[in-house]
Image (spheres, grey):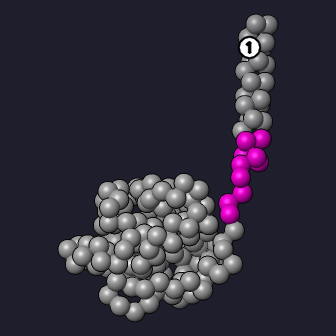
Amino acid sequence: MKRRTALFVGAAAAAGGAGVGVALWRSRPAAPALPADFWTLRFERPEGGELALAALRGKPTLLNFWATWCAPCVKELPLLDRFQRDQAARGWQVIALAIDSPTPVREFLRQRPLGLAVGLAGLTGVDLTRALGNSQGALPFTVVFDAGGVPRERKLGAVEPGELAAWARDIL
């Protein structure tokens, strides 16, 4: 009898915990919609020319916001660059938007060249990160879009190799 009561109590506790979990999941804030003009945005490139987000539509895209003065940003850039090389054949695009002045970015890239596309977002890029769901405006911040242009993942803080592998596997 005691055993049945213990099983019943355990099952009731598990069901209650699941109910709380579902309630929390349902009450989480919805991910923000993309700004209406998002796919029309254009950014100057450090080497000259322009980076147009419209050219990325139809491709899975990893959009990373970084700055030369942000140690975690600088540390993750080689990982993102490698992801671009490894996933390019599958159509992935990796874009690094610098929340920085053009001169430090150009100097940084002369010392540490990158194969991924870099755009100069400047300080107004912080507003864009907020519009994409980064309420703190902190860096690094990454948004992963599927080929349909829908944001599928948002990550505040440095990305990890396991996250990149999961995104490459699950998002197209």
At numbered mark 1, what does the secondary structure look like: helix, strand or loop? helix
Q: Is residue 154 above or below residue 56?
A: above
User: How many tags in the picture?
Assistant: 1
Q: Quadrant of residue 4?
A: top right
Q: Is residue 53 above or below residue 79?
A: below
The N terminus - image quarter: top right
The x, y position of residue 63, in whole percent, is: 49, 71
Question: What residue appears at the point 48 percent right and 56 percent down from the top-left corner?
Answer: 138
Position of 17 with respect to 55 (left or right) is right
The x, y position of residue 159, in whole percent, is: 42, 58
Q: Quadrant of residue 48?
A: bottom left
Q: Which residue is mark 1?
A: 6
The span picked out in magenta is 22-32
The x, y position of residue 35, in whole percent, is: 66, 74
In the image, farthest residue toward the top: 2
Q: Is residue 30 magenta?
A: yes
